[in-house]
Amino acid sequence: MRFSDFGELLRYRAETTPSATAILTERDGKAHKISFRELLEDVQARAAGLSGTGKTSAGVFCDGTYETLTDLFGAALAGMQLALFGENPDRAQVEAADVDLLLGEKELAAEFADAAGAGVSEGAGRVLMFTSGTTAKNRAVALTQQSLCAAARNGASLLPLSPDDILMCMLPLDHVFGLVCGLLWGMQCGAATALGRGPRHYFDDLAFFRPTVLPAVPLLMGFLTGKNLLNPELRLVLLGAGDCPPALPAALKAKGLGVHFGYGLTETSSGVALSLGEDPYAMTVCPEDRVTLAPDGEILVESPACMMQGYYKDPEKTAQTLRNGILATGDIGRFDEEGRLYVTGRKKEILLFSDGTKVFLPAYERGLAAVLPGRDFAVIGVGGAAALVLRGDPAEEGRVLRQIAPYMQTLPLGQRIRAVRFINGPLPRTATGKIKRWELQQKAGTQ
């Protein structure tokens, strides 16, 4: 089914499967079922209350609770522009989003009240979501309820769920992977969605809700797998939004799970391609999308149904990235002989050495991880050479150099670490665990 907005999706489910479970959440220490009819009634009640405020643009602090859903969907039904923020919001994001109403956790709403703006004159159906900010400062991307619903339909057409499935949502809803794959995908298929209770419950959420389907970033899935926390009912895993070492899908397959990898961007309302066969990295392009490669291997996406309207109030950056409806993703890829897409790197995460050779930094870091177990580190480029950045004390430099020496001996001379830099505190990462390299460059004093 094609849906023009969130309200149409909710009404369809409430009319066709009113008593089916839409949401599972915790109440009084037990898993509590909320039907599609009850969900729609709660959302309509919230929309009625918001319609009387005279506000036009709602910012929602997404903490993953049921109240977040009723705020989000309620503001959408009330005709407001939406801006979705995380649990640790950036003040600049709130200021940039033109919100005149803040919803969600009351202490956050009070803390950021002075960052709210005057609202918008036209914004019904628009949803602002922020890029992850791995290689540049995160930007507000103008999506629509329709494009997000189309992205969910895209995924469901390749990887349909059963109404008997329970989709576990442990992802942040202010990211497209979380909103589309952790929520709308299940609703599109009529499946139930279990709302995770946050990081404090990573150890017991799967045992509590007994999901059959789990979308997750590789970092989280690696933790759950390593701690043996996967429940026996789980049948399907969808990985995305992060670099995935081959050992992880292999370990999941060894447990008898169906393993799929998804590729998508905020700018395309999430999914562009999904793996369907035995190779989790060989992805089939979604029906609504068309993917081609630039001469340098950059992945170009055309997706009229799912494409962003543009970067919010930034026509210059929009014009640089989106030309004639075709998005330059900044990712590098290739097609195999069967037309399946492989994502092999990111242009801004490829380090060009002074000798003309190139390496993909996440792959370089995986090699170093074996000789730096348990260390918080990353590799950046400084003057055409590789520099290692760690959390720690500069007095450790000699010991660190000795630790990495065995791995360095396996690399060409021009690709070896030339400098070690230390910073205080953890390395800057996105909500999905990816290194914010632009910010790390600043912290390490290389910009």
Image (cartoon, helix red, strand yellow):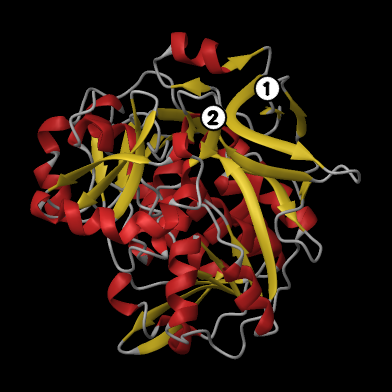
Above or below 51: residue 347: above
Task: Tell me if 430 is positioned left or right of 353 in this view.
Answer: left
- Give the spatial CA distance, label 1 vs label 2: 10 Å
Q: Can residue 106 be seen in this snapshot?
A: yes
- Local crowd size for mark 1, using a 10 Å CA cut-off: few (<14), some (14–19), many (≥20): few
Residue at image position (34%, 68%) is: 373
Of the image marks 1 and 2, the number of the one nearer the N terminus? 1
Which residue type carries mark 1? Answer: Asp
Residue nearer the viewer, 420 or 196: 420
Q: Where residue 17 appears, x then y in whole percent?
A: 68, 70
Residue at image position (55%, 23%) is: 309
Q: Kindly identify which numbered label has been placed on residue 347.
A: 2
Residue nearer the viewer, 406 or 35: 406
Q: Kindly identify which numbered label has been placed on residue 427.
A: none
For the residues bearing labels 1 and 2, Cβ distance under 8 angstroms: yes
Residue 421, quarter of the rendered image: top left
| Secondary structure beneath label 2 | helix
Task: Tell me if 79 is positioned left or right of 138 in this view.
Answer: right
Residue nearer the viewer, 237 or 279: 279
Which residue type carries mark 2? Answer: Lys
Q: Where residue 298 appears, x then y in whole percent?
A: 65, 27
Task: Tell me if 125 is positioned left or right of 156 in this view.
Answer: left
| Secondary structure beneath label 1 | loop
Q: Can residue 288 be seen in this snapshot?
A: no
Q: Quadrant of the C terminus?
A: top left
Residue nearer the viewer, 1 or 50: 1
Point out the residue furthest to the right here. 338
Q: Which residue is mark 1?
A: 296
Residue 114, quarter of the rendered image: top left
- Local crowd size for mark 2, using a 10 Å CA cut-off: few (<14), some (14–19), many (≥20): some
Residue at image position (59%, 69%) is: 247
